Amino acid sequence: MSGSPQTGQGVQVAAPARRSTVIMGRQDFVSVLFRAINAELYKIRRRMMSKVLAIIGILFIIAGFVILSFTVASQAAAIAQKPATEFLPLSCIQASKQSCATQADLAKQAALQSATAPLHLPNSFVNAVGMINFIGLFLLVTLAGTIVGGEYHVGTIRLMLTKGPTRTQFLLAKAGAILACIAITFLVLVPTGIITGTVLMFIQAPGIAINFSFLTGMWVLHALLYLLAAILGLFVYTMIALCLSTLGKATVAGVAGTIVWWIVEGALADALGLLASLGRGPLNDFLKAIPDYFIGNNIATLLSNQSRYLEGGQPTTASDLHALLVLFFYLIVFIGLAWWVSERRDITN
Amino acid sequence: MNDSLPLYDGTTVINTNRLTKAFGNLVAVNDLHLQVMQGDVFGFLGPNGSGKTTTIRMLLGLIRPTAGRAILFGMDNTYQLPAILQRVGAIVEMPVFYPYLSGLDNLRVITVNSGMVAGKANDHRLEEVLEIVELRNYAKLAYRKYSLGMKQRLGIAAALLNDPELVLLDEPTNGLDPSGMIEIRHLIQRLSSLGKTIFLSSHILSEVQQVCNRVGILRKGNLVKQGNVNELLRASEQIEVRMSRDDQTEYAQGVLRQAQQQGADWIMDVTLEQNMRNQSVLMVNAPAFRSAEVNMLLAQNSLFAAEIHPREGSLEELYLQVTTSSPSAGEHVGMEALAQAPGDTGIETPGKGKGGNK
């Protein structure tokens, strides 16, 4: 520090050496940012609320698969009770009895496999992500709103901003910590869901073997892209919470605002779709096109375009590029607005 | 008026140049020229709402000034705030920490945000600061369970974590019992002896008088006095004179005023007042040690004093004097005042050193 250049204000006061017990880290932008993210994650790890939210998330996934397993079990039981002859393929009419019996058994097995599919891979992966997308929205938005709004509400922002990180670093550290939390949520809850589903499948429909032939390099790649799309989706919603909490200087502003946004957006998309379907013409086309610029629709597009590689299905009409551009636009708007406000804001009581 | 700051010799730690903050129509801080030198224990005084905390917040970059600049360690805090904050430890009003974390965990978070490395590398430093503020036994207790005094002490620990050169303390004794206040006073003196610069905002004038070598007094956002404590107190010393006959008091006033005009420039003012016993007395604004000379001037004119009381100045009197009287042009310390000779305003020029009142 003593070697720092002079400013136009005169000679800089040379910094004396600190005590040997004070061990300073690197002071470049990225190092300070990563330390600030580290501090945010430390705070999250230490607070009871995060633990409660994590337990709620895990219980929700387990409960989701338990409920799914009852549906699966009833379907599997119905199939198991039917005689194999009911699964006799049409081609068996002219075939020999022995081969037909084998084919009927195989067809019954396939029907059982299909009925239990939601509980085991690959479908359980998609189901787990779907459940996390739903519950994660509430949990992570609550977390995001709290870690930002709480700083203003409690007044700790005053302490943090007088310690070194700039307001930009402070905001980015919050966003970085939230992103890390989203990733951790998926890393913990997806395996939880898959394991729960598999265990429940063995309990509810014993004797069903899992076919791992789906597990190719391409499947893993699309599974990864599917996860990234889901993470991006939740990240956009948490950034709304971050922005609104910053604007409102309160947790409730971020949490309630984001959930209202999510509900209104979904309802509006349905209403516009309904209105558009009532007639034909440019106005209807316009109304139909509006939801293409909604957050939820674009997240759904990204997920659908990947899930068809994971469990089959049809591609959507919207492209990944369109969805990504729309979502990044929202991210820039929300993070930018939060940054703009926090840069200009006076930190008073 | 030249807006640029004069070049200093590298020992000015805080230097504000026309620092102003307005909240709408309310001017909280007006045209503030503040100078704190390296090693100073600077007392920042003023009534509630005079702009002390706003000034501290502007120095720390929490509040953007409406006009003017704050230069700390020769760096403009608009552009080089992170580098400045690396060298500053601060308590702004009542310190607030994360209620769900223990005192130690709160300090760990601050350690990382203060530019220090994360992990156990700084554990020894954490122990040191907890020891300084005597919170070692309560380090693992949740912050929400801390008493007011413990919270204040944790705030001081947080301010000292990265061994800063400048410590800004805004009402550090708030919520502390008398023994806690004494401890803080000793701590300030200890930090000062280690070469730290202390900027202390306080309402407790006796405390400021005991620990500070320089003070600045704010009134309605204006800096009305700034300077060495001893010099300011000397300037507020008075000699109370009661004449043997009441009808001589006015005449004696004329004699002393005449003497002032004829060269006794140590007499700053002579006023006629009533003392506590409702007697007419003369209040001579002059150093207390000039009492004998006052007596001699009167005697030379066949005027005989019944009582002469030299009154030593106190910060309390000075404070009341400058915060209750209407501001005069001479009191306002602006750029013009800074340009005057130090003796004229009671303001030291940088590098002049401190008189010390410790």
Image: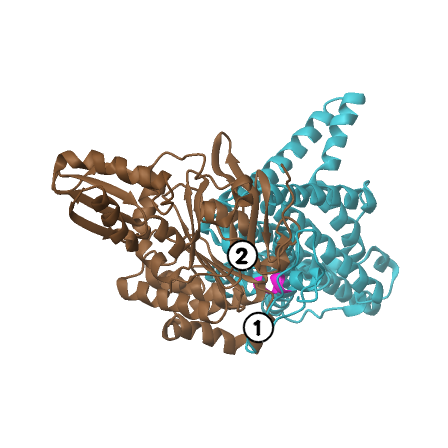
Chain colours: A cyan, B brown
What is the magenta segment's predominant secondary structure? helix
Chain under callout 1:
A
Most foreground residue, A222 or A153: A153
Chain under callout 2:
A
Determine whether label 2 and label 1 are within 8 Å by CB: no
Q: Residues within 10 Å of mark 2 (few under 14, many from 20)?
A: many
Q: Residues within 10 Å of mark 1 (few under 14, many from 20)?
A: some
Which numbered disc, 2 or 1, marks the residue closer to the eye? 1
Q: Please, what is the three-letter code of the amino acid marked with disc 1?
A: Arg
Q: Quadrant of the N terminus of chain B?
A: top right
Q: Position of residue A96 (x, y in %)?
A: 86, 66
Eyeballing the image, is B98 above or below B121? above
Asked whether B259 falls inside the magenta stretch, the response is no
Q: Position of residue A180 (x, y in %)?
A: 64, 60
> Is residue A238 among what the camera can see?
yes
**Left or right of residue A211, residue A54 in this image:** left
Q: Which residue is mark 2?
A: A160
Q: Earlier in the sequence, mark 2 or mark 1?
A: 1
Which residue in the rendered view is the most extreme toward the right?
A94
Eyeballing the image, is B100 above or below A304? below
Query: From which residue to which does the magenta span run?
Result: A35-39
Callout 1: SS: loop
Callout 2: SS: helix
Eyeballing the image, is A111 above or below B51? below
> Is residue A119 among what the camera can see?
no
Give the quadrant of residue A63: bottom right
**Left or right of residue A251, residue A126 in this image:** right
Tell me what residue is drawn at x 76 percent, y 48 percent.
Answer: A302
Q: Position of residue A76 (x, y in %)?
A: 64, 60
Tell me what residue is drawn at x 49 percent, y 46 percent.
Answer: B55
**Left or right of residue B181, residue B63 in this image:** right
Q: Which residue is mark 1?
A: A18
